[in-house]
Image: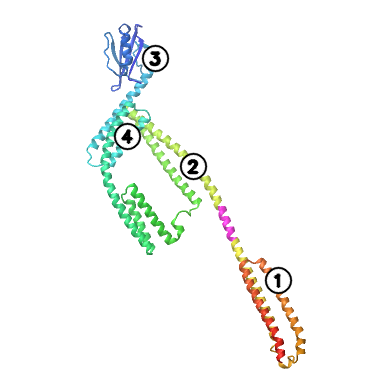
């Protein structure tokens, strides 16, 4: 509301008068002008409404009266001998003007603080980050009051313009410091890049990795303390991280060079632990705010001046708002923690099931390997039996050519008589071969590919033995002819 108010009313004699009220916020008083109806022309009334009410100077006609009253919340704004039709307008003006007075007092306090900061800034020879932080903190306080509408627009605009001038002055000093900092950052960037290139060269030459890894850790410590601009820091960190991964891959294998092997449970667990840490920090922050709130409440009880009490009250309101905002955030974080705990339980159940499946798979593989080993040993025994059977058959047949001469047939007729015996022997050999083939066929149906290869070798040995028997059978008649 404007600091001036014009309305019609009645005086103690119940005569109609024009009442004009003007707020003097600096001394917390209200000036009251009354004009009898007979001196108020239409033109004057219109000028009072259109010009005087918005702050312009206006010559008053003769016959008006002037008085003043202190502005107080508990007392009426108008004296008892003045009555108005729109009492609600007067009551609203009284309330809003009281707020305006408090805002003015707060504005004066802020201007005094800003003036002190201005004196310190003007004496600076170089940029000072602590002064910048103080100026920023001051503006944050003003912004809080603006957001809470504790400062009227005119006051907040004045403070904003004055603060912006100081910020501009500080920025000019900081730009000079930034130029120096950028130069240092460039030098550090080139120095670290040269050291990292040397490390990469050592890795490519195949030197011992343990001392190289220690050198990288030392570089990492130096990197944290070195001064870098944002872009330079990002580039150096990227190359340093790549060097670490390269050395880890060389030392421990490709899996060690990346974090891709982290399971979903591990990633979820790290997120949960980070959230728990954030919740603890938020709870500590709320506790500090509550301690500050208790301190302000104790101080407001022992305050000396009304303005100080009002400022304390404003601070209390700010702290309460900060606590409320943080508690809302803490509620969100607590809900997120509950969700993560559910997800952790689900993921742990999945991980337990996965481990159970992996264990069952391992046991199955061991069982299959054991069965394969047993079948291989069984097939080896069958092979040995087949080879022994073939050798026995071969030994029985080869005994005939080495028989004593007196017992050997002397004529073609005796050779012919011996042929049926050789034929019978060949048939027995064929039966043995058939039995061997049937045995090998059964083994083929049960064994895997490796066992099948062993069986084929056994059949080849049997066939070789049969061929030798056949050769011996063919040589017997030739021996008879020679005799």
Quadrant for the C terminus in the image: bottom right
Asked if the residue under mark 1 is in contact with the one under mark 4, i.e. CB atoms within 8 Å, the reply is: no
Q: Nearer the viewer, residue 339 or 57?
A: 57
Label 1 crowding class (10 Å Cα cut-off): few <14, some 14-19, many 20+?
few
Main SS, magenta residues: helix
The relative height of residue 466 versus residue 54 in the rendered view (above or below) is: below
Residue corresponding to mark 1: 438
- CA gap between label 3 and label 2 equals 54 Å
Q: Position of residue 44 (x, y in %)?
A: 30, 11
Residue at the image position 27 percent from the left and 38 percent from the top: 170
Magenta span covers which residues? 352-363
Residue corresponding to mark 2: 336
Which is nearer the N-term, disc 1 or disc 3?
A: 3
Q: Nearer the viewer, residue 265 or 116?
A: 265
Residue at the image position 30 percent from the left and 7 percent from the top: 39
The relative height of residue 252 versus residue 303 in the rendered view (above or below) is: below
Q: Position of residue 232 (x, y in %)?
A: 33, 49
Q: Nearer the viewer, residue 383 or 316?
A: 383
Residue corresponding to mark 3: 87
Which is nearer the N-term, disc 4 or disc 2?
A: 4
- CA gap between label 4 and label 1 equals 100 Å
Residue 139: image tag: 4
């Amino acid at each position: 509301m404007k600091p001036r108010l014009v309305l019609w009313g009645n005086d103690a004699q119940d005569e109609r008068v024009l009442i004009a009220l003007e707020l003097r916020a600096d001394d917390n008083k209200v000036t009251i002008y009354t004009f009898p109806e007979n001196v108020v022309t239409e033109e004057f009334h219109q000028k009072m409404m259109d010009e005087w009410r918005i702050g312009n100077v206006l010559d008053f006609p003769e016959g008006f009266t002037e008085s003043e009253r202190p502005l107080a919340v508990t007392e009426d704004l108008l004296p008892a001998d003045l009555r108005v039709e729109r009492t609600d307008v007067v009551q609203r003006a009284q309330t809003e003007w009281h707020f305006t007075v408090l805002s003015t007092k707060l504005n004066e306090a802020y201007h005094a603080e800003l003036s002190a900061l201005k004196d310190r800034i003007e004496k600076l020879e170089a940029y000072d980050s602590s002064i910048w932080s103080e100026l920023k903190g001051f503006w944050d306080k003003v912004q809080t009051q603006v957001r809470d509408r504790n400062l009227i627009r005119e006051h907040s605009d004045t403070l904003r313009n004055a603060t912006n001038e100081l910020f501009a002055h500080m920025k000019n000093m900081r730009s000079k410091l930034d130029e120096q900092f950028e130069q240092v950052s460039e030098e550090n960037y080139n120095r670290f890049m040269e050291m990292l290139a040397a490390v990469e060269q050592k890795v490519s030459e195949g030197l011992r990795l343990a001392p190289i890894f220690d050198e990288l850790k030392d570089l990492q410590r130096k990197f944290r303390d070195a001064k870098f601009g944002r872009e330079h820091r990002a580039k150096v960190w990227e190359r340093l991280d790549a060097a670490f991964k390269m050395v880890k891959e060389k030392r421990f294998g490709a899996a060690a060079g990346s974090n891709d092997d982290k399971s979903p449970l591990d990633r979820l667990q790290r997120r949960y632990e980070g959230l728990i840490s954030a919740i603890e920090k938020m709870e500590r922050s709320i506790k500090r705010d509550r301690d500050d709130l208790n301190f302000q409440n104790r101080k407001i009880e022992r305050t000396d001046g009304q303005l100080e009490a009002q400022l304390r009250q404003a601070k209390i309101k700010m702290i309460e708002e900060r606590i409320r905002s943080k508690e809302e955030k803490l509620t969100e974080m607590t809900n997120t923690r509950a969700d993560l705990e559910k997800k952790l339980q689900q993921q742990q159940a999945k991980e337990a099931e996965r481990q159970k499946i992996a264990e069952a798979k391992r046991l199955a593989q061991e069982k299959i390997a054991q069965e394969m080993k047993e079948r291989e040993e069984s097939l080896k025994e069958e092979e040995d039996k087949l080879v022994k059977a073939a050798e026995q058959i071969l030994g029985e047949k080869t005994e005939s050519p080495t028989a004593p001469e007196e017992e050997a047939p002397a004529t073609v007729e005796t050779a012919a008589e011996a042929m049926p015996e050789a034929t019978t022997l060949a048939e027995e050999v064929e039966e043995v071969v058939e039995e061997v083939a049937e045995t090998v066929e059964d083994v083929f149906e049960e064994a895997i590919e490796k066992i099948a290869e062993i069986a084929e070798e056994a059949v080849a040995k049997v066939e070789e033995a049969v061929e030798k028997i056949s050769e011996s059978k063919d040589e017997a008649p030739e021996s008879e002819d020679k005799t």
